[in-house]
Every structure is written in structure tokens, then in C-alpha cells.
Amino acid sequence: MLPNYLPRPPRGDRPLVVLGISDVVVIEGSASVPVTTHRVSAWGRWVRDVAIPDDAAARIARLADRYEVVWASEWGHNAHTAFAAALQLPDEPWPFLPVQFDKIDRIRAYAKGLPWAWIDGPVVDLHATDGVDDGIVIRVDPASGISGVDLEALDAQLAELAR
């Protein structure tokens, strides 16, 4: 990670949606949804082919219309740059939390009381996330990733948290 990096603080006017990459945006194994292989790169320093659900760009755009999106993945500062073209992301990068495992405490500290949802793969934390009541933890099916997330249910849950 980048030494001494501090993510831009949340704006504070919208709930946060924290996104992982592996199993969420990138399907690593067999896919149960339509995917397309995209060649991604960050600043031309490396290139990797990844399978991305065909509806990922639209789903992430929908999230960005309603929430402040933050990356939290092993892709770190490369996430936004690498996936900008494939996901039609805005030019200004979204903040990223410099954490790969045991993300829950870092997400809570970053949110500072804002409603939040964390969408990630099933095996990213060494601590249990059962009983979380200050945010929403969504573990995706690695075969469908973000395509399998019920966005309407997420909207309702975040609205309830905001009350």
C-alpha cells in the first residue's frame, strides 16, 4: 500500500457502500451469470484479464447515484484506475481503504457513524461479522458477484439504518 495514505474523508451527505473487487466485480471461478473478459491495467504498469459480470457497470453506477462508493480490496489504490474503463467509472477516483483482511473495524472507523454497507466475497475477514448492527454486511456468491446483490433490499436496509 501507499505509505501514510489516508483516504479522503466521507462527504457525510450519503450512506457509504464499500466494495470489494474479488468475487464482487471479478469472478475468479466458474460464473453463474453472463460475464465478459476485460483487460485491466493501472497506469500501464501491468495487465490482467478478468471476468466481470455483464451488468456490473450498471449496478455500480446505480450504487454511485445513491451512495458514496469506497473501495476496500486487495487492489488498493489500483482499483479505480484498473476498472475505470470496464465499469465506466467517473474520472475522479473513489477513495479506497488500505486494508485487505479484517476490514470491518476499518470500515466502521471510516464511516464515523454514517450508515454503511459492505459488499464483499465470503472469505475476507478472520473475525466473524455476525451480529453487526451498525451497518450491513453482504457476502456475495462468488459465482455471481455483484449481479446477485438485491439492490432494492440494500436500499431499504440502508434507509432503515439512516433513520
Image (cartoon, rainbow, N blue to C red):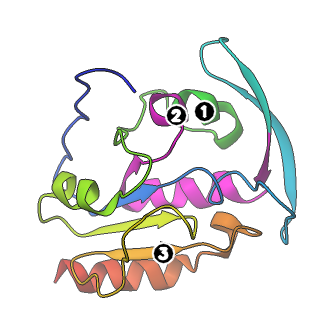
What residue is disc 3 on? 138
Mark-to-mark CA distance, 1 and 3? 23 Å
33 up-or-down from 92: above or below: below
Q: Amino acid at mark 3?
A: Ile
Q: Which residue is disc 1 drawn over?
A: 84
- Label 3, residues with CA under 10 Å away: few <14, some 14-19, many ≥20: some
Point 75% across, 22% down: residue? 47
Q: CA distance from mark 1 to mark 2?
A: 6 Å
Give the residue at x 65% y 51%. 57
**Distance Cα–Cα, label 2 vs label 3:** 21 Å
Point out the stretch of residues depicted in magenta.
Answer: 50-79
The residue lying toward the viewer, choosing from 54 and 103, is: 103
Q: Which numbered disc flags the more N-terminal residue, 2 or 3?
A: 2
Circle 2 sits on which residue?
A: 80
The answer to whether 109 is drawn above or below residue 45 in the figure is below
Between disc 1 and disc 3, the foreground one is 3
**Total marks placed:** 3
Q: Amino acid at mark 2?
A: His
Q: At numbered mark 3, what does the secondary structure look like: helix, strand or loop? A: strand
Residue 118 image offset from top left, x and y in percent: 41, 65
Secondary structure beneath disc 2? helix
Q: Are marks 1 and 2 in contact (CB under 8 Å)?
A: yes
Q: Is residue 64 magenta?
A: yes
Precedes in sequence: disc 1 or disc 3: 1
